[in-house]
Amino acid sequence: MPFKLGSKCNPYTSFGSLVVDSSEADRNQFVPFDPTCRAPSFLAKLRAEAPNHHSSDFSWMQNKTVLLIGDSISREHVENFCSLMGLESEVVRKSHKYSPQPAAVRATKAGHAVERPARLYQRGFRVVRDASLPRICYVPKYDFLLVSVFHFGLDQEDYWRGSRMPQYNSPGMFEHRLSDTIQPLIANMRADGRRSAPDYVEVTSGMWDLARWAEQDMDEQQETETGLAQDRVTWYRFRVGQLLEKVRKAFPNAKAKTWRTMHYPTDQVAEHDYFMDKITARTTNQTASPPPPSFSHNRVFQLDQAIRSLVLPSAEADGSSLPAPHPDFRLNEWGKILKGHDAHQKDRLHGDPLPGGYLWADIMLYELHHAVKVADMQPMRSMEPVVY
Protein backbone atom coordinates (compact mmCIF):
# COMPACT_ATOMS: atom_id res chain seq x y z
CA MET A 1 0.00 0.00 0.00
CA PRO A 2 1.41 3.44 -0.85
CA PHE A 3 2.33 5.88 1.87
CA LYS A 4 -0.18 8.68 2.44
CA LEU A 5 0.96 12.09 3.55
CA GLY A 6 -2.41 12.73 5.14
CA SER A 7 -1.98 9.82 7.57
CA LYS A 8 -0.14 9.87 10.87
CA CYS A 9 2.48 7.50 9.49
CA ASN A 10 6.07 8.70 9.53
CA PRO A 11 8.30 5.86 8.31
CA TYR A 12 11.43 7.23 10.00
CA THR A 13 9.86 7.40 13.46
CA SER A 14 8.16 4.02 13.09
CA PHE A 15 9.51 0.72 14.40
CA GLY A 16 11.70 -0.92 11.80
CA SER A 17 15.22 -1.90 10.80
CA LEU A 18 17.99 -0.42 8.69
CA VAL A 19 19.02 -2.44 5.65
CA VAL A 20 22.73 -1.95 4.93
CA ASP A 21 24.51 -2.72 1.68
CA SER A 22 28.04 -1.41 1.18
CA SER A 23 28.12 -2.29 -2.53
CA GLU A 24 24.74 -1.01 -3.77
CA ALA A 25 23.92 2.43 -2.44
CA ASP A 26 20.21 2.41 -3.19
CA ARG A 27 19.64 -0.72 -1.13
CA ASN A 28 20.44 1.20 2.05
CA GLN A 29 16.93 1.80 3.33
CA PHE A 30 15.10 2.05 6.62
CA VAL A 31 12.23 -0.44 6.45
CA PRO A 32 9.34 -0.08 8.91
CA PHE A 33 7.79 -3.30 10.17
CA ASP A 34 4.38 -1.93 9.20
CA PRO A 35 4.04 -2.67 5.46
CA THR A 36 1.50 0.17 5.11
CA CYS A 37 4.09 2.73 6.24
CA ARG A 38 6.83 2.48 3.67
CA ALA A 39 9.50 5.12 3.17
CA PRO A 40 9.20 6.80 -0.25
CA SER A 41 12.90 6.22 -1.14
CA PHE A 42 13.32 9.70 -2.58
CA LEU A 43 17.10 9.52 -2.92
CA ALA A 44 17.01 6.32 -5.00
CA LYS A 45 14.44 7.90 -7.34
CA LEU A 46 16.44 11.11 -7.58
CA ARG A 47 19.67 9.24 -8.36
CA ALA A 48 17.91 7.13 -11.01
CA GLU A 49 16.90 10.15 -13.07
CA ALA A 50 18.77 10.92 -16.27
CA PRO A 51 21.04 13.96 -15.87
CA ASN A 52 19.08 16.12 -18.32
CA HIS A 53 15.61 14.84 -17.43
CA HIS A 54 13.61 17.30 -15.34
CA SER A 55 10.92 15.30 -13.57
CA SER A 56 7.73 16.83 -12.22
CA ASP A 57 7.99 14.25 -9.41
CA PHE A 58 10.57 16.50 -7.77
CA SER A 59 8.99 19.89 -8.41
CA TRP A 60 8.85 20.32 -4.61
CA MET A 61 12.67 20.57 -4.63
CA GLN A 62 12.71 23.43 -7.12
CA ASN A 63 14.55 26.52 -5.82
CA LYS A 64 14.55 25.15 -2.27
CA THR A 65 17.29 25.84 0.26
CA VAL A 66 18.11 23.50 3.14
CA LEU A 67 20.15 24.94 6.02
CA LEU A 68 21.99 22.71 8.49
CA ILE A 69 23.29 24.33 11.68
CA GLY A 70 25.51 21.82 13.39
CA ASP A 71 28.91 20.18 13.60
CA SER A 72 31.28 18.12 11.47
CA ILE A 73 28.56 15.49 11.03
CA SER A 74 26.33 18.12 9.41
CA ARG A 75 29.22 19.18 7.19
CA GLU A 76 29.79 15.62 6.06
CA HIS A 77 26.09 15.17 5.32
CA VAL A 78 26.42 17.95 2.75
CA GLU A 79 29.56 16.39 1.30
CA ASN A 80 28.04 12.90 1.22
CA PHE A 81 24.83 14.14 -0.41
CA CYS A 82 26.83 15.68 -3.23
CA SER A 83 28.92 12.54 -3.58
CA LEU A 84 25.83 10.34 -3.78
CA MET A 85 24.42 12.67 -6.45
CA GLY A 86 27.65 12.56 -8.47
CA LEU A 87 28.41 16.19 -7.68
CA GLU A 88 31.14 18.13 -5.87
CA SER A 89 30.50 20.04 -2.67
CA GLU A 90 32.06 23.46 -2.21
CA VAL A 91 33.66 25.32 0.68
CA VAL A 92 32.34 28.85 1.22
CA ARG A 93 35.61 30.73 1.60
CA LYS A 94 36.01 34.51 1.82
CA SER A 95 35.89 34.98 -1.95
CA HIS A 96 32.61 33.09 -2.37
CA LYS A 97 29.53 35.10 -3.33
CA TYR A 98 27.64 33.78 -0.30
CA SER A 99 30.41 34.45 2.21
CA PRO A 100 29.43 36.99 4.88
CA GLN A 101 31.71 39.82 5.81
CA PRO A 102 34.15 38.88 8.60
CA ALA A 103 32.51 39.49 11.97
CA ALA A 104 34.03 41.90 14.44
CA VAL A 105 36.07 40.25 17.19
CA ARG A 106 33.92 40.13 20.29
CA ALA A 107 35.27 40.55 23.79
CA THR A 108 35.70 37.40 25.86
CA LYS A 109 34.93 36.83 29.50
CA ALA A 110 37.72 36.85 32.02
CA GLY A 111 39.82 33.72 32.00
CA HIS A 112 39.50 33.03 28.29
CA ALA A 113 42.43 33.95 26.08
CA VAL A 114 41.84 36.05 22.97
CA GLU A 115 45.04 34.92 21.25
CA ARG A 116 45.18 31.40 19.82
CA PRO A 117 48.14 29.16 20.65
CA ALA A 118 51.01 30.09 18.34
CA ARG A 119 51.44 26.59 16.93
CA LEU A 120 47.99 26.70 15.35
CA TYR A 121 49.00 29.54 13.05
CA GLN A 122 51.76 27.32 11.69
CA ARG A 123 49.27 24.73 10.48
CA GLY A 124 49.11 25.17 6.73
CA PHE A 125 46.66 22.39 6.03
CA ARG A 126 43.61 23.63 4.15
CA VAL A 127 41.52 20.82 5.58
CA VAL A 128 42.05 22.30 9.04
CA ARG A 129 41.45 25.90 7.98
CA ASP A 130 38.28 24.95 6.10
CA ALA A 131 36.83 22.55 8.66
CA SER A 132 34.48 25.06 10.27
CA LEU A 133 33.61 27.04 7.12
CA PRO A 134 30.20 26.57 5.47
CA ARG A 135 29.74 23.80 2.91
CA ILE A 136 27.28 23.84 0.03
CA CYS A 137 25.97 21.24 -2.37
CA TYR A 138 24.12 22.58 -5.40
CA VAL A 139 21.88 20.45 -7.63
CA PRO A 140 21.48 22.64 -10.73
CA LYS A 141 18.71 20.60 -12.34
CA TYR A 142 16.35 21.60 -9.53
CA ASP A 143 18.13 24.75 -8.37
CA PHE A 144 18.35 22.97 -5.02
CA LEU A 145 20.89 24.16 -2.46
CA LEU A 146 22.06 22.35 0.65
CA VAL A 147 24.27 24.33 3.04
CA SER A 148 25.84 23.51 6.42
CA VAL A 149 27.08 26.08 8.93
CA PHE A 150 29.32 25.12 11.83
CA HIS A 151 28.95 26.07 15.48
CA PHE A 152 30.85 25.16 18.63
CA GLY A 153 28.14 24.10 21.06
CA LEU A 154 26.04 26.00 23.54
CA ASP A 155 28.52 27.34 26.09
CA GLN A 156 28.16 31.03 26.88
CA GLU A 157 31.81 31.86 27.52
CA ASP A 158 33.39 31.15 24.13
CA TYR A 159 35.21 28.26 25.77
CA TRP A 160 37.00 26.98 22.67
CA ARG A 161 38.61 30.30 21.76
CA GLY A 162 41.55 29.70 24.06
CA SER A 163 41.83 26.01 23.28
CA ARG A 164 44.18 24.04 21.06
CA MET A 165 41.32 23.37 18.63
CA PRO A 166 42.71 24.14 15.16
CA GLN A 167 39.31 24.43 13.49
CA TYR A 168 38.11 27.28 15.71
CA ASN A 169 37.07 30.54 14.13
CA SER A 170 35.12 33.33 15.78
CA PRO A 171 32.52 34.02 16.90
CA GLY A 172 32.17 31.08 19.25
CA MET A 173 28.91 31.68 21.11
CA PHE A 174 25.89 30.29 19.28
CA GLU A 175 23.87 33.51 19.39
CA HIS A 176 26.79 35.50 17.96
CA ARG A 177 27.40 32.89 15.28
CA LEU A 178 23.73 33.06 14.30
CA SER A 179 23.70 36.86 13.99
CA ASP A 180 27.24 37.40 12.64
CA THR A 181 27.66 34.42 10.31
CA ILE A 182 24.49 32.45 9.58
CA GLN A 183 21.98 35.23 9.01
CA PRO A 184 24.35 37.27 6.77
CA LEU A 185 25.07 34.10 4.77
CA ILE A 186 21.34 33.56 4.25
CA ALA A 187 20.87 37.24 3.37
CA ASN A 188 23.47 36.84 0.61
CA MET A 189 21.60 33.83 -0.72
CA ARG A 190 18.34 35.76 -0.78
CA ALA A 191 20.01 38.63 -2.60
CA ASP A 192 21.21 36.09 -5.16
CA GLY A 193 17.65 35.03 -5.96
CA ARG A 194 16.90 32.46 -3.26
CA ARG A 195 14.15 34.56 -1.74
CA SER A 196 12.57 31.83 0.36
CA ALA A 197 15.85 30.69 1.94
CA PRO A 198 15.89 28.76 4.12
CA ASP A 199 12.93 26.53 3.33
CA TYR A 200 14.12 23.87 5.74
CA VAL A 201 16.29 24.24 8.85
CA GLU A 202 17.98 21.41 10.71
CA VAL A 203 19.82 22.12 13.96
CA THR A 204 21.81 20.04 16.41
CA SER A 205 24.23 20.45 19.29
CA GLY A 206 25.84 17.96 21.61
CA MET A 207 29.31 16.79 20.62
CA TRP A 208 31.01 20.09 21.42
CA ASP A 209 29.11 20.32 24.70
CA LEU A 210 30.14 16.79 25.70
CA ALA A 211 33.76 17.42 24.68
CA ARG A 212 33.88 20.57 26.81
CA TRP A 213 32.54 18.77 29.87
CA ALA A 214 34.93 15.86 29.31
CA GLU A 215 37.89 18.23 29.13
CA GLN A 216 36.77 19.98 32.30
CA ASP A 217 36.30 16.64 34.06
CA MET A 218 39.76 15.46 33.02
CA ASP A 219 41.28 18.71 34.28
CA GLU A 220 39.60 18.05 37.62
CA GLN A 221 40.67 14.38 37.52
CA GLN A 222 37.05 13.30 37.43
CA GLU A 223 35.68 10.32 35.55
CA THR A 224 34.07 10.91 32.16
CA GLU A 225 32.29 7.55 31.98
CA THR A 226 29.79 8.50 34.66
CA GLY A 227 26.57 10.29 33.85
CA LEU A 228 26.36 14.05 33.66
CA ALA A 229 25.42 15.87 36.85
CA GLN A 230 21.83 17.04 36.87
CA ASP A 231 22.79 20.71 36.77
CA ARG A 232 24.63 20.13 33.47
CA VAL A 233 21.62 18.38 31.94
CA THR A 234 19.30 21.12 33.19
CA TRP A 235 21.60 23.79 31.75
CA TYR A 236 21.82 21.96 28.41
CA ARG A 237 18.04 21.63 28.19
CA PHE A 238 17.63 25.33 28.97
CA ARG A 239 20.19 26.33 26.34
CA VAL A 240 18.63 24.09 23.69
CA GLY A 241 15.31 25.80 24.38
CA GLN A 242 17.01 29.15 23.82
CA LEU A 243 18.60 27.88 20.60
CA LEU A 244 15.26 26.67 19.24
CA GLU A 245 13.63 30.00 20.00
CA LYS A 246 16.48 31.94 18.38
CA VAL A 247 16.31 29.82 15.23
CA ARG A 248 12.53 30.15 15.09
CA LYS A 249 12.74 33.95 15.28
CA ALA A 250 15.63 34.14 12.82
CA PHE A 251 13.82 32.06 10.17
CA PRO A 252 10.08 32.38 10.83
CA ASN A 253 9.11 31.48 7.26
CA ALA A 254 10.98 28.18 7.09
CA LYS A 255 8.53 25.48 6.04
CA ALA A 256 10.22 22.85 8.21
CA LYS A 257 12.38 22.88 11.31
CA THR A 258 14.01 19.72 12.66
CA TRP A 259 16.46 18.63 15.32
CA ARG A 260 18.93 15.93 14.24
CA THR A 261 19.46 13.38 16.98
CA MET A 262 23.02 12.60 18.04
CA HIS A 263 24.65 9.36 16.96
CA TYR A 264 26.55 7.09 19.32
CA PRO A 265 30.26 7.26 18.38
CA THR A 266 32.06 4.00 17.68
CA ASP A 267 35.05 4.38 19.97
CA GLN A 268 34.43 5.51 23.52
CA VAL A 269 38.13 5.79 24.34
CA ALA A 270 40.93 7.81 22.77
CA GLU A 271 38.36 10.15 21.27
CA HIS A 272 39.24 13.45 22.86
CA ASP A 273 42.54 14.12 21.10
CA TYR A 274 40.99 12.97 17.85
CA PHE A 275 38.05 15.33 18.28
CA MET A 276 40.34 18.23 19.07
CA ASP A 277 42.78 17.65 16.21
CA LYS A 278 41.49 15.34 13.51
CA ILE A 279 44.70 15.10 11.51
CA THR A 280 46.82 13.93 14.43
CA ALA A 281 47.81 10.28 13.99
CA ARG A 282 46.42 7.75 16.40
CA THR A 283 48.78 6.58 19.11
CA THR A 284 50.83 3.49 18.37
CA ASN A 285 51.85 2.92 22.00
CA GLN A 286 49.92 -0.21 22.87
CA THR A 287 51.13 -0.22 26.49
CA ALA A 288 49.83 3.23 27.37
CA SER A 289 46.52 3.46 29.20
CA PRO A 290 43.77 4.70 26.91
CA PRO A 291 42.50 8.18 27.68
CA PRO A 292 39.00 8.46 29.11
CA PRO A 293 36.05 8.76 26.72
CA SER A 294 34.65 12.13 25.74
CA PHE A 295 31.36 10.85 24.36
CA SER A 296 30.26 8.02 26.63
CA HIS A 297 26.96 6.59 25.55
CA ASN A 298 25.21 7.27 28.83
CA ARG A 299 25.96 10.98 28.41
CA VAL A 300 24.77 10.95 24.80
CA PHE A 301 21.56 9.29 26.03
CA GLN A 302 21.05 11.97 28.71
CA LEU A 303 21.25 14.76 26.13
CA ASP A 304 18.96 12.84 23.78
CA GLN A 305 16.34 12.56 26.52
CA ALA A 306 16.57 16.30 27.21
CA ILE A 307 15.91 17.02 23.53
CA ARG A 308 12.91 14.71 23.40
CA SER A 309 11.36 16.45 26.40
CA LEU A 310 11.45 19.71 24.44
CA VAL A 311 10.01 18.62 21.08
CA LEU A 312 7.79 15.63 21.92
CA PRO A 313 4.64 15.56 24.09
CA SER A 314 5.02 13.97 27.52
CA ALA A 315 2.67 11.36 28.96
CA GLU A 316 0.67 11.99 32.10
CA ALA A 317 -0.27 9.34 34.67
CA ASP A 318 -3.90 9.38 33.52
CA GLY A 319 -2.92 8.59 29.96
CA SER A 320 -3.26 12.14 28.68
CA SER A 321 -0.33 14.04 27.21
CA LEU A 322 1.18 17.46 27.77
CA PRO A 323 2.16 19.44 24.68
CA ALA A 324 5.85 19.88 23.97
CA PRO A 325 7.48 23.27 24.63
CA HIS A 326 8.70 23.40 21.01
CA PRO A 327 6.28 21.26 18.97
CA ASP A 328 7.10 22.97 15.67
CA PHE A 329 10.49 21.22 15.63
CA ARG A 330 10.35 17.64 14.37
CA LEU A 331 12.91 15.00 15.29
CA ASN A 332 15.26 13.62 12.67
CA GLU A 333 15.88 10.18 14.18
CA TRP A 334 19.09 9.63 12.19
CA GLY A 335 21.23 9.10 15.28
CA LYS A 336 18.83 6.67 16.90
CA ILE A 337 18.42 4.58 13.72
CA LEU A 338 22.21 4.28 13.28
CA LYS A 339 22.83 3.05 16.81
CA GLY A 340 24.76 -0.22 16.71
CA HIS A 341 26.10 0.19 13.17
CA ASP A 342 29.67 0.62 14.37
CA ALA A 343 31.18 -1.32 11.50
CA HIS A 344 30.18 1.46 9.13
CA GLN A 345 32.22 4.20 10.77
CA LYS A 346 35.12 5.55 8.72
CA ASP A 347 36.73 6.96 11.85
CA ARG A 348 35.91 7.44 15.51
CA LEU A 349 33.18 10.01 15.02
CA HIS A 350 32.16 10.08 11.38
CA GLY A 351 30.28 7.55 9.29
CA ASP A 352 30.74 6.40 5.73
CA PRO A 353 28.26 7.59 3.08
CA LEU A 354 26.74 4.11 3.35
CA PRO A 355 24.56 3.75 5.25
CA GLY A 356 24.76 6.94 7.35
CA GLY A 357 24.97 9.57 4.62
CA TYR A 358 22.37 7.84 2.49
CA LEU A 359 19.95 7.44 5.42
CA TRP A 360 20.30 11.10 6.39
CA ALA A 361 19.62 12.24 2.80
CA ASP A 362 16.49 10.11 2.58
CA ILE A 363 15.17 11.52 5.86
CA MET A 364 15.99 15.10 4.83
CA LEU A 365 14.20 14.73 1.49
CA TYR A 366 11.21 13.14 3.21
CA GLU A 367 10.95 16.00 5.72
CA LEU A 368 11.33 18.65 3.02
CA HIS A 369 8.66 17.02 0.85
CA HIS A 370 6.35 16.69 3.83
CA ALA A 371 6.79 20.34 4.76
CA VAL A 372 6.28 21.64 1.22
CA LYS A 373 3.17 19.55 0.65
CA VAL A 374 1.67 20.46 4.02
CA ALA A 375 2.31 24.15 3.30
CA ASP A 376 0.64 23.79 -0.12
CA MET A 377 -2.38 22.11 1.48
CA GLN A 378 -3.01 24.79 4.10
CA PRO A 379 -5.50 26.80 1.96
CA MET A 380 -7.14 23.61 0.70
CA ARG A 381 -8.07 21.47 3.70
CA SER A 382 -10.43 19.39 1.59
CA MET A 383 -7.63 18.24 -0.70
CA GLU A 384 -7.11 14.46 -0.89
CA PRO A 385 -4.01 13.02 0.85
CA VAL A 386 -0.89 12.96 -1.30
CA VAL A 387 0.01 9.41 -2.31
CA TYR A 388 3.57 8.38 -3.24
Image (cartoon, grey):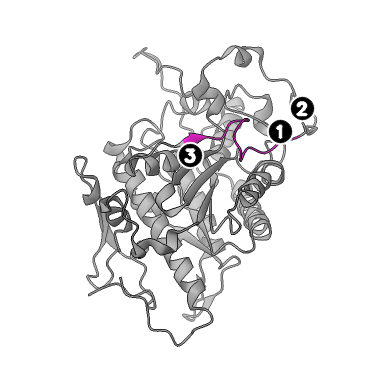
Task: Give yes or no for residue 252 being in the magenta stretch.
Answer: no
Q: What's the magenta bit mostly, secondary-structure-wise?
A: loop
Does 357 sit above or below residue 91? below
Of 205 and 58, nearer the camera is 58
Q: CA distance from mark 2 to mark 3?
A: 31 Å
**Around disc 2, counting alpha carbons within 10 Å, would you say few (fewer than 14), some (14 to 19), or many (20 or more)?**
few
Does 357 sit above or below residue 216? below
Task: Give yes or no for residue 97 being in the magenta stretch.
Answer: yes
Mark 2 or mark 1: which comes first in sequence? Answer: 1
Which residue in the protein does label 2 denote? 111
The residue at 33%/37% (across/down) is 352
**Around disc 3, counting alpha carbons within 10 Å, would you say few (fewer than 14), some (14 to 19), or many (20 or more)?**
many
Of 75 and 12, nearer the camera is 75
270 vs 342, left or right, is right
Q: For mark 1, give the secondary structure.
A: loop
310 vs 295, left or right, is right
Q: Position of residue 187 (x, y in %)?
A: 66, 49
Q: CA distance from mark 3 to mark 1?
A: 20 Å
Q: CA distance from mark 2 to mark 1?
A: 25 Å
Give the extent of the magenta segment: 90-103
Which residue in the protein does label 3 denote? 75
The residue at 70%/46% (across/down) is 175
- Which of label 3 and label 1 is nearer to you? 1
Amino acid bearing label 1: Pro
Circles 2 and 3: CB distance less than 8 Å? Answer: no
Mark 2 or mark 3: which comes first in sequence? Answer: 3
Which residue in the protein does label 1 denote? 102
Amino acid bearing label 2: Gly
